[in-house]
Amino acid sequence: MVKKYKIGIVTFHRSHNCGSILQAYATQSILRRHDYEPEFIDFSTAGQKDLYSTLERLKFDTLSSFVKSIYRNCLRILIIRRTIRNWRSYDKYILNNLQLSAKSYNANAELIEDDMSYDKYLTGSDQVWNVTIADYDEAYFLNFVKKHPKIAYGVSQGARDISKYSKDVENVKSYISDIDFISTREGNGQKWLEALTGQKHALVLDPTLLLQSNDYAAIEEAHGLKGIEPDNYIFVYSKPLSREYMKIISSFARHNGLKIVLWHSDVWVKKLGYFRGVKCPADQTPGKYLDLMKNAKFVCTSSFHGVVFSTIYHKNFVVLENDGMRAGDDDRMTGFLGRVGLSSRIVDESTFATRMGEAVDYEEFGEKLKAEREESLKFLLTALG
């Protein structure tokens, strides 16, 4: 009988963020499908917990950051019951759908390889190599693993080149050089890693794209919003959301007899959604996000996983262009859309209405995605052995 390798995974599985949880679920599903035993090492830093807490800690490093943290907390207080309910719902969803280690870890120093029972270790996907974000930690470079094979699948630096933004480039470089198999999710990340290490690593799909729409049926949940029926609404998954974009989305909805559903509660509050008849789920989970995505008439997003699930469910969608995309460093969406022939779905205020009226060509997309999926899966299975 062939031995089943037990794979210890380090990723952002504890983030109360739909994309983070769903990429973890997809990784777990793919590994199980190929007879591995995946388990998420239940590691979550203080920075990550603060990022998704009901109220964030006040920041005193600069006057600007202090004022902004006060402002964000004021918004959260306005919807504190909703915020608490959402925190509990996300946590329950994680526990119900992901295989976590029996022991939880709060700091890198607590991760002791000899106390674990994994055959191989995997880091990724998501922005686990973005060295500037609040939940960054060197553990995502598997620096605590010395005796077992290490794999980095679809790791993302976001829009932050390690060479420019890391406070300890040489140390990070040594961690990367010690990983046996490395792949990255974005072209910029591939270029930056090659400049840092002298090696060109594979470019792969986010794990969510290794599954198909029916693979998510088991974790979808009814959204429960009154008056929101299949194909009668625009689903807006965008944070931040400018006043200009909100105005043109509202105008398009009004002229086409559609309702609007905003996902992010703080955006809903800032846009006075309650008074404008805009819906927002009061009890959120990634399952409800999938349901809203699946049944929307249109999707408007500025999120990588918003784009991903729009394509998985074959929705008519547009990507709301932002400054990061215009600058070129943030190629999370532009790179993926370019690889699958959908760059035209990126819009600004002047092209929004035109693109919303044009159906997405999913025939060409399907052909290109199939080829990318085969190469990505080949890398992952070769690395896992």
Image: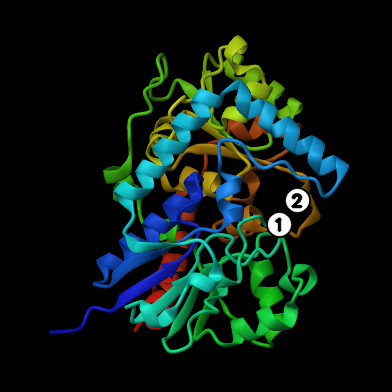
Whether residue 81 is visible here, answered yes or no, is yes
Does 30 appear above or below 260? below
| Residue at the image position 67 percent from the left and 77 percent from the top | 193
Which residue is tagged 1?
Answer: 330
From the top left corner, tell me how far across and down residue 347 is, in percent.
Answer: 69, 39
Q: Position of residue 148 (x, y in %)?
A: 41, 86
Residue type of the residue flagged with mark 1 = Asp
Q: Quadrant of the C terminus?
A: bottom left
Task: Using the image, tell me which numbered label, if any, was put on residue 324.
Answer: 2
Identify the coloring.
Answer: rainbow
- Asked if residue 234 can be seen in this view, the reply is no
User: 196 or 248: which is nearer to us?
Assistant: 196
Q: Residues within 10 Å of mark 1 (few under 14, many from 20)?
A: many
The three-letter code of the residue at mark 2 reads Gly
> Residue 111 location, x and y as percent?
47, 73
CB contact under 8 Å: marks 1 and 2: yes
**Residue at the spot 45% in from the left edge and 20% down from the top edge:** 232
180 displayed left or right of 271:
left
Front residue of 114/255: it is 114
Q: Residue at horizontal 62%, vertical 21%?
A: 78
| Rendered residue at 63%/57% (across/down) | 332
Residue 362 screen position, x and y as percent: 46, 48
